[in-house]
Amino acid sequence: MSIVNSASAQLSKLPSVDRVLGFATVRRLVEEHGRTSVTEAVRELLAELRRSANTDLDEPAVCARLERAMAARSRPNLRPVFNLTGTVLHTNLGRALLPLEAVEAVIAAMTSPAALEYDLATGERGDRDELVESLLCGLTGAEAATVVNNNAAAVFLMLNTLALKREVVVSRGELIEIGGSFRLPDIMRRAGAKLVEVGTTNRTHAKDYAEAIGPRTAMLLKVHWSNYAISGFTSVVPEKELAAIAHARELPCVVDLGSGTLVDLTQYGLPREPTAGEAVANGVDLVTFSGDKLLGGPQAGILVGRKDLVERIKRNPLKRALRVGKITLAALEAVLRLYRDPDRLAERLTTLRLLTREAGDIAAQADRLLPALTRALAGHAGVSVQPMKSQIGSGALPVDVLPSAGFAIRPVAASQRGRALARIEAAFRALPIPVIGFVRDDAFQLDLRCLEDEEAFAAQLQSLEVGT
């Protein structure tokens, strides 16, 4: 029997909330999702029916709509996706993926009490930084280390501790802006430090730093170019030379590596990136870098360097506000331990494994998936396998690319191609596990460098629905 048989004159015949809750299908939804949530969904549906004067919904149709509503309500906001953007460390998609060892460590830390600030040897209160400090020192050659929630926080805390109401000398070419219009000068200002710019955008010399040092100078700061490169007529002061200038005036030399890495990437066939250990070896007093970029771990800001400076930073009251919890430390410790086995690092560390995938292997994967993708898009678009160029991402090696492969998806209809591409892109985002690609050269493209679960990707293609 139709629940809504006519227009507004029949709206009074809409069932009550209690009646809908009594439907067999809805009772099952209550058992699965809870009475409160289902009742809210029923009320919302009935209100929508009243507004639209819907006249053709029977019990099965109402139940079907409620099932869809509850599926949407129960879906988490932070959802897994397939990152086929060609950017391995994609900031908007969560940057580094954690290796299995880190996932297992996180689960253990989440599901049982853990010795976070408890010294098991003495039975007294401990320091949570000690969980990872020895590992960081061993991997970088530093005297001490501490961890906060991200690298911006590490830079902020360092400046606030060592340069409050004093001057920090930085090259003009290193006053970077990272994602979200987040600028280094703004961080310095908020930290209470005064910026002293030296040199020019493309050329800064040793004498520029030396001449800028005065009685209010707190440190010399060198910042790694995060997401751009300057080429041509350029000059920068090497870390070792900058450290010597600072030490001659009894000042610390500090380097913000940004992305940061712990190993020489060239041994894996990747472009060169400066390491934290090299900075320490060059005489740098403090080095800051991220945990969730090239290091391949959780979001964190890591400071390594001289023990006396690290201890001062740890005594800053802001350290407590910026400290990380047991979940981050568990993941970071597990990732750092992988670096102690360099022979298997490229296999076990997810980020490095994705970065070192051979283009030939990726192309072979594309060939295997081509038939299923072609069937899913039949009548809507043509699909071809083509070479691609992946990026590392998150400010690491911005001008270097990695040879890759993937799909170029082009709408069948040449007219209104832009709208057709938007529909195709939206259809991939609407899959159970959303697929995130990119539009370039009049095609929706999928770079397969980061696709490891090939079976799951292929299985859901039958659910692809491209609108018209």
Image (cartoon, helix red, strand yellow):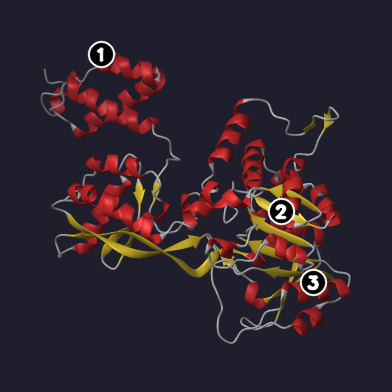
Residue 44 at x, y percent in the picture = 31, 28
Pointer 2: residues within 10 angstroms few (<14), some, or many (20+)?
some
Residue labelled with disc 3: 243
Identify the mark nearer the N-term, 2 or 3.
2
Does residue 3 show up? yes
Identified at 21% across, 44% down, the residue is 465
Specify the amino acid type for callout 1: Ala
Judged by depth in the image, the label closer to the viewer, 2 or 1, is: 2
Residue 166 at x, y percent in the picture = 81, 67
Residue labelled with disc 1: 24
Identified at 66% across, 77% down, the residue is 172
Judged by depth in the image, the label closer to the viewer, 2 or 3, is: 2
Identify the mark nearer the N-term, 3 or 1.
1
Q: CA distance from mark 3 to mark 1?
A: 75 Å
Specify the amino acid type for callout 2: Leu
Which label is found at residue 139?
Answer: 2
Specify the amino acid type for callout 3: Ala
| Secondary structure beneath label 1 | helix
From this viewpoint, which residue is outermost toward the front?
343
